[in-house]
Amino acid sequence: MTTVEPESAPRCPVHDYTPYELKPLGAWAEFYHQLQDEAPIVKNEFGRGYYIPTRHEDILAVLQDPETFSSDSVIAYEPDPAYRWIPHMINGDEHRQWRRQLGPYFSPRATEQVDARVRAKARDLVAQLAGRGACDLMKDFALKFPTAIILEVVGLPPEDLDRLLELEEEIVHAVGDPDDALRRKLAAINAVKQYLAEKIEQRRARPADDMITKSLGIEIDDRPVTDDELLNYWQFLVQAGLDSVAGMLGYFFHHLATHPADRQRIVQQPDTIPQALEEMLRAYSFIVTARKVTRDTEIAGCPVAAGSMVQLILKMSGRDDEFYHDASTVDLDRRTSNHLAFGAGPHRCLGSHLARRELRVALEEWHLAIPDYRLGEGEPIVEFGRSSGVNTLPLAWDI
């Protein structure tokens, strides 16, 4: 990594680093903390270059100003993407129409209705693991649990899970040569779309009581949505459902495996799990998104020209010492409620209620069956840079 101070923008140090590099667990958080200490905004010259606000208040301001910071692109080094995830990458009234029609499917009431299925799936998976005395939390639980729920709620066959997880890995965590990684990513996106196109046609021929069938009736501007719009919506929803909760579970269980006092607290006082959940969401926020600047503006006093990209690293918001006292410390008594783990503004995560339910149930059911555990032996734990998540999490316990 190199760092220079450009004469034209002394308040915006310039770096040049690879944003999707694999690093040992915790190394990305340390690097982001260094950037925060350096300046409220920095620039990375990777790709065509992009700006990174490092403070909570500036990250929040960008998220809440969609007119200046558009979601036309949500990956900082892909300013002109060859894909359009719906509703994540649309703006204005069109975005509001999608959210209005999709919102009831992800409301607290809708989430409450699937609680029994969520809990049964978690309990079943934990029961299969409890007698083994060891597992890879990511492979054996964190990926299987939320993805099985998404497939069931959406109406996709559970036997398709492994194939979808393979494609998800290419979309979210493709590493290596940038051009080759982008090629593999686009190929995986197209493969998911082809898979979903077949499922949509099946529902048209044989409707069912699932979200795919219900989505066929969505209208935008008083017209039925096109097949391409449906595919862009379902591709994004499946992708988000396969990745986000699994990533958070990896961080949560690593923390609890290495902080026995916190683990014992939620075992002995399970009613504190919702509060603990919010604090860990703050501390281990891992989503990295981006916005495209629509007009000349400033961030933290630094001029940012129209057409520029701004990367939003939500972990920086959660670890901002100027906003949270002793932000790097996980304090289960903090009573956090204003974190940005699910974003903010009009594009705040539509599935946050379901995600919270899955995370809460996972913590409850696991600790009922396996209250004491520790890190086990296995390959080194590393995490991804752009959309963080650990590759593995070996756990062990006495039986």
Image (cartoon, rainbow, N blue to C red):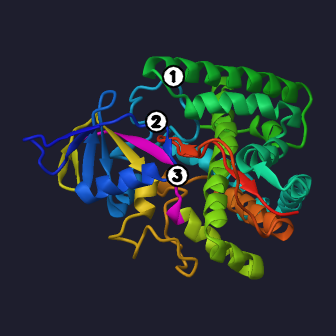
The residue lying at 77 percent from left, 28 percent from top is 163
**In whole angstroms, how far apart are the C-alphas of marks 1 and 3?**
21 Å
Looking at the image, is mark 1 or mark 3 earlier in the sequence? Answer: 1
User: From which residue to which does the magenta span run?
Assistant: 282-296
Give the residue type that dot 3 points to.
Answer: Phe
Kind of residue at badge 2: Tyr
State left or right for residue 386 relative to residue 323.
right
Q: SS class of the residue under badge 3?
A: loop
Q: Name the residue under label 3.
A: 286
Which numbered disc covers residue 181? 1
Residue 118 horizontal/vertical position (percent): 83, 57
Relative depth, front residue between 39 and 115: 39
Q: Can residue 302 be seen in this view?
A: yes
Q: Earlier in the sequence, mark 2 or mark 1?
A: 2
Q: Distance between the residues labelled 2 and 1?
A: 10 Å
Instruction: Tell me the element at label 2.
Output: loop
Question: Is 365 placed above or below 84 here?
Answer: below
Residue 53's spot in the image, x, y percent?
A: 31, 52
Q: Residue 93, position in %: x, y? A: 50, 44
Contact flag, marks 1 and 3 (Cβ < 8 Å): no
Which residue matches tag 2?
Answer: 20
